[in-house]
Amino acid sequence: MSFVREVVTLVAKDLRLEWRSRTRINATLFFALLTLLLFSFAAGPAQALQAANAPGYLWLALLLSSVLLLGESLRIELENDSLEALRAMAVDARALFVSKALTNALFCFLLGVVLVPVAVGLYGAEVKLGFPRLVGVVALGTLAIAAPGTLYATIAVQIRARDVLLPLLLFPVLVPGLLASVRASSLIMQGDPMGQTGSWLLLLAVFDALYWILCTLMYGRVIED
Amino acid sequence: MKRALNIGLPVVALILVVLGAYQGLVVAPTERMMGEVYRIMYVHVPTAMMSLLAPTIVCVASLVYLVKSSRQADALAEAGAEVTVLFATLCLVTGSIFGRPTWGVWWTWDPRLTSVAILWIAFIGYLALRRFVDDPDKRATWSAVTAIIISVDVPIVYFSVKWWNSLHQMQSSPNTVDPSIAAPLRLNITAWFVVFLALLWTRYRIGRAERDREESTPVGEPKAVLRMSP
């Protein structure tokens, strides 16, 4: 099978699996909404403060819930030795990575698309440059989470203390991605008189490209026996 | 040769650090703007340099491991990671103490501070990963992959935070610093470099010995013995 067909088949498999139960995405969605709510309690009732911090809260909620999604997406592969079976079928490790990371990016993105209007409403924020641009940032930002996230989740699910280790490994690496996502989102939400959004998006795109390439290349070593 | 290194490196390191401290604390003149406070620079600058040198070694050793699967490279990467955490801790602590009287704050979101802090926490994650994996080959591979991901990240952190915010002074070069201040600094950098080598070498030897022991004992057996004894 060609690389693209392998990826498509694997993504379809993951989506079908998720569609049949829908528990993972549902539970994560409510976790994310709860996190947004908790941030507003932590910040206090001052509307102006909440509106100013809305982009940060949005991305933190998205990041925290993505970790749950990532861990689960690899855990199901270890049940019944599915990962072993995929390896036995001589599936290209790079195709396996790209498909897993794409599915994870898609779920995180969908989560983000739901969270954006909720965050805007809940914190009384504005989106001065329009929702489509903000959704674009969500797409780039979730791609940034998905690549190193999928690779680290594959390592973490195979060892003890996986729940602590995944964020401990992932969060430091995601700092530039998170910073760029928050800055770009807040410029889009609060207005960008100096035209700085572009440079943050560029940084985010470079981050995405670097980690997607690097993780695709190294994934074979991570899942080898 | 190895014996000479085992004993020689720590001894030379100790002598040089004592000489460096004497030069820095007594011989070097008082600085015009900062007064005596600046003397912490004689520890801060060398530890900052070593906290960047050490992860470079980890990155190179990890690349070598991924290509050649050599046990030596893995042991060197492990040693380098521990030395990284040690020197990054020293760098952050001395930097904080230096920052308080000169900048008026213990901490600021400066690119260099932030990237060393991220480096520090990322390598703590790296060491935690190593502790949690029992299989030596998997541990070596996974930690090599992690080290490379961290190495790519740190420069991006630096630039992203630089765009975000900045306060740290530009690096001084020996040309902008009076020789009476620069000479003790050179001595201290050499001293801390030898400390770095001594620690790296010692930890590398321990790592090699651990690898040899792991190979000679089957996985799980020592635990069974431990469980039986009261």
Image: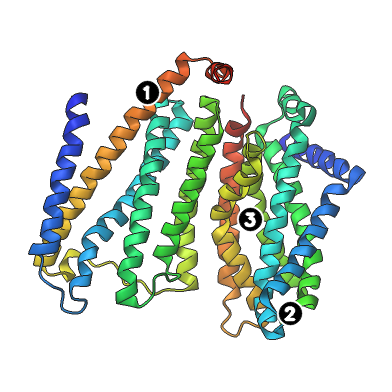
Inspect the image, locate mark 3, and give the three-letter code of the amino acid beneath it. Answer: Ala
Q: Which of the two marks, 3 or 1, is nearer to us in this view?
A: 1
Which residue is label 2 attached to?
A127
- Location of residue A63 in the rendering, given as x and y in whole percent from the top left corner: 67, 58
In this rendering, would B96 be left or right of B6?
right
Say above or below: A141 vs A191.
Answer: above
Mark-to-mark CA distance, 3 and 2: 22 Å
* Screen quadrant of the C terminus of chain B: top right
Closest to the observer, B152 or A199: B152
Contact, mark 3 vs mark 1 (Cβ under 8 Å): no
Q: Are the residues under marks 3 and 2 on the same chain? A: yes
| Quadrant of image for the N terminus of chain B | top left
**Residue placed most toward the observer, B156 or B55:** B55
Residue type at mark 1? Ala
Q: Nearer the viewer, residue B131 or B149?
A: B131
The chain letter under disc 1 is: B
Toward the viewer: B101 or B174? B101
Q: To which chain does the residue with label 3 belong?
A: A
Residue A51 position, x and y percent, is 70, 80
Question: Could you say whether the residue bearing mark 1 is in a helix, strand or loop?
Answer: helix
Which percent across, then down, holds residue B148? 48, 43
Question: Which residue position holds label 3?
Answer: A144
In the picture, the disc for residue B209 is 1
Q: Residue at x 81, y 41 (%)?
A: A14
Are the residues at dot 3 and dot 2 in contact (C-beta closer than 8 Å)?
A: no
Residue at image x 36%, y 66%? Answer: B96
Residue B185's image quarter? bottom left
- The reply to whether residue A137 is visible in this rendering is no
